[in-house]
Amino acid sequence: MRLATCTPAAACFTLTHLSTFSAHLSEGNDHFRAKRFPEAIAAYSEAINLSPDDHTFYSNRSAAYAAIGEWENAAADGQNCITKNREWIKGYFRLATAQQNMGQYQDAIDTLTRGKALADLPKQTRDELATKVAECRAAMVRDRTAACIESANKLLANDDIKGALQMAEAGLRQDPESAELKSLKARVEPMFQRQEKQRVAGLSRTELLKEEGDKLFKAAQFENAIEKYSKCLDAEGSMTTPLAVKCLLNRSACYKQLSNFSGVIDDTSYVLEEHPENVKALIRRAQAFEACERYRLALQDVRTAIGLGISVIGNANFTLCTSMQGRLDRAIRIDRAQS
């Protein structure tokens, strides 16, 4: 590891000052090369006390902290180095190395990206930056994969076979080459298939119709799915049972995919008559009203959903509804101005 040599930070220093902090820097470098890292840190700290604006001292002390695994201190000195001289690429490497070793991979990538933006970097330095970014991205994938495996095993231990399979599949989408995830999926999938076979065998005729509609929906065969959901509703003989509500919501999703907004409004309205705070129905009907340019009715549903609170409707739906509210407010003002 290359260490910086003395570069006076201020022309106003006396020769005595220069001689003293140069001696501390030289002493620190000697300790560092001899792997006496605490002594090196002490010497660099003395140099910093005498010349607090010299970025090279922070860089060297960051390297010494890194050598003994004190990553928070190494990161602080890396950041100080950048603050003192934003054009010196080594400061970005020092900070990113510490962030990487603390598991702050995205922060490290951001630091390296800022360093890469510096002008006139030689090709070798740019290649080193790219290599380090790739290392951080690979580490992020490894961490996410390990988290998926851990979560899947916990779900499996709690007999949530479906959840374990879904977790393994989610992990494979981000790390398709993971042998451990492939093995986990191969172990869990037959268990899920046996469980699913038993579940389907216990379904009633109407439940089987809904099940067939769900499969068709996932296959994007929306018109055929609508037919199955309609048959299920006819066989159920009611629009208010839990099964009927599920069918109405799923059929409204099919209508939405086909841009049949009247169908969406009809099915969600049936649901909302019995369940006026059903979030899916409120948002889906609001979207259909907006598509039909019935902005005031759409805004009414959006405000109802927002009024339920973020803890009820979730972050994603809350963000969607607030965005829709602003858009609908503008559309209503334009309509009012034009009338």
Image (cartoon, helix red, strand yellow):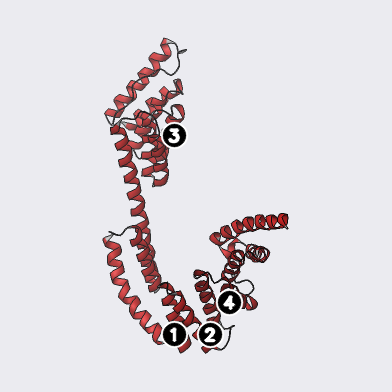
- Residue 204, image x and y in percent? 46, 88
Q: Which mark is residue 208?
A: 1
- Residue 18, image x and y in percent? 40, 14
Q: Which residue lies under the disc numbered 2?
A: 233
Identify the image quadrant of the N terminus: top left
Mark 2 Cα shell of 10 Å, populated few (<14), some (14-19), many (≥20): many
Mark 1 Cα shell of 10 Å, populated few (<14), some (14-19), many (≥20): some
Of the two numbered discs 1 and 4 in the rendering, the one whose residue sits closer to the viewer: 4
The amino acid pointed to by label 1 is Leu
Q: Earlier in the sequence, mark 3 or mark 4?
A: 3
Q: Which residue lies under the disc numbered 3?
A: 79
Residue at x 61% of width, y 57% of height: 322
Q: How many marks?
A: 4
The amino acid pointed to by label 3 is Gln
Residue at x 44% of width, y 79% of height: 224
Q: Earlier in the sequence, mark 2 or mark 1?
A: 1
Q: Which of the two residues, 31 or 203, is positioned nearer the viewer here?
A: 203
Q: Which of the two residues, 257 or 118, is positioned nearer the viewer here?
A: 257
What kind of element bears circle 2? Answer: helix
Q: Is residue 185 visible?
A: yes
The amino acid pointed to by label 2 is Leu
